[in-house]
Amino acid sequence: MEILKVENLTVKRDEKTIFENVNFSLKEGEKFFIVGPNGAGKTTLIETVVGFIKPASGKIFLKGKEIKTEEDYYKLRITVGYIFQNPDDQLFSPTVEEDIAFGPLNIGIPREEIPRIIDNTLSTLGISHLKGKMTYKLSGGEKRLVSIASVLAMNPEALIMDEPTVGIDDKKLKLLIKFLKTTNKSLILITHNKEIINFFNWPTYKLENGKLKYI
């Protein structure tokens, strides 16, 4: 089943075409990379897909239904969790556990279930020791993993991760790789990290000169 489908998506900025007629789909259980040079528009593409940027043309579908309204985009963002390139854009609560609790509470999960969700999510990523930490005291790599946890806690069916290896040391990279290896969630991973690309050998799309191509 296709969770997400993009048809002929085009984005322009100040009359300049960032990319045009982009097509891809993400099926249940599927994982793939999006690569490309800096400035190619990879983050812009994903932010368009999740509704942060308005496209010039094209269609986006969630489980076969075309996304048209803000309510549709809300459902999309719950179903397809987006982890920002900069974790500071995602973390805004004083403590790690408050940050992880925010998403589940926001989508209506009963408060009594939240402690279990926090513990399970932290354990899944191997960062249970960060539970009581202040977010502003975290290292860059710790922030990266906590930002993933804050999205994972809402139990989305799929994840889009934008450069998740940036600012992460070898120890935390191993935790990230373990998660990517064991998760059953569908994944789109934007990265420049050749180690990750070579390790997983997932299908890869390249965004360059305004075109997205399978390579």
Image (cartoon, rainbow, N blue to C red):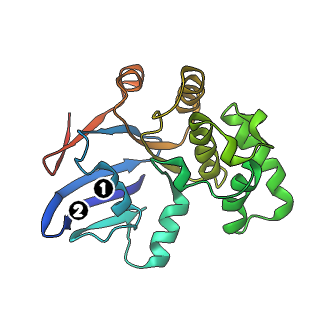
| 116 in relation to 55, above or below | above
To which residue does mark 2 refer? 9
The residue lying toward the viewer, choosing from 32 and 140, is: 140
Element at badge 1?
Answer: helix
Q: Position of residue 118 (x, y in %)?
A: 76, 48
Please give left or right for residue 132 compared with residue 62 in the image: right
Nearest to N terminus: mark 2 or mark 1: 2
Q: Quadrant of residue 123?
A: top right
Q: Position of residue 91 (x, y in %)?
A: 61, 54
Q: Quadrant of residue 196?
A: top left
Residue type for callout 2: Leu
Q: Position of residue 113 (x, y in %)?
A: 82, 56
Residue type for callout 1: Leu
| 199 in relation to 18, above or below | above
| 81 in relation to 32, above or below | below
Element at badge 2?
Answer: strand
To which residue does mark 1 refer? 45
Please give left or right for residue 164 compared with residue 119 in the image: left
- Asked whether disc 2 touches disc 1, contact meaning CB atoms under 8 Å apart, the reply is yes
Please give left or right for residue 160 compared with residue 197 in the image: right
Q: How many marks?
A: 2
| 215 in relation to 14, above or below | above
